[in-house]
Image: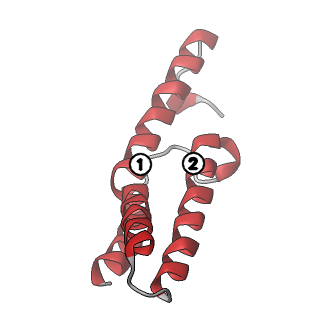
Amino acid sequence: MFLAILILAAAPMLDTSVFRSSYFKPVSLFLFWFFLASSLVLGWIGQSIVESPFIEIGTFASIAYFAHFVPNLVAVGYLEQAVISSFTAKRGAHPSKAN
């Protein structure tokens, strides 16, 4: 439980994207909905009894929850920066000088 709260507190520092809005980031928007679904599944699994199908579902939902923050949040920012810089290089503008 402490690790989940610690990761939520560190999430703003892990975001490496140029844009802060999800309007311009379709991959991040998909990952947000995936995170929301995994959080809801974890809440449902937390109130279920400890039996075979619920243990596996809880394990997968926990992995999806933590994978959203650590590798996905950092990797998506770098991926979006690479796409933006390649797109602006084709247009003849530098990404840091784009308005």
> What residue is drawn where x is 57% and y is 57%?
34
Q: Position of residue 42 (x, y in %)?
A: 48, 75
Q: How far apart are marks 2 and 1 (CA)?
A: 9 Å
Q: Residue 72 carries which label?
A: 1
Taking depth in this image into account, of 32 and 99 the one nearest to the observer is: 32
> Which kind of residue does numbered mark 2 sit on?
Ser
> Which kind of residue does numbered mark 1 sit on?
Asn
Quadrant location of the N terminus? bottom left
Q: Position of residue 36 (x, y in %)?
A: 59, 66
User: Which residue is tagged 2?
Assistant: 28
Measured along the vertical axis of the image, is residue 21 above or below residue 82? below
Locate residue 64: give its quadrant: bottom left
> What residue is drawn where x is 52% and y is 26%?
83
In the picture as drawn, the residue positioned furthest to the left comes out as 3
Locate residue 99: give its quadrant: top right
Taking depth in this image into account, of 50 and 98 the one nearest to the observer is: 50
Q: Position of residue 33 (x, y in %)?
A: 62, 58
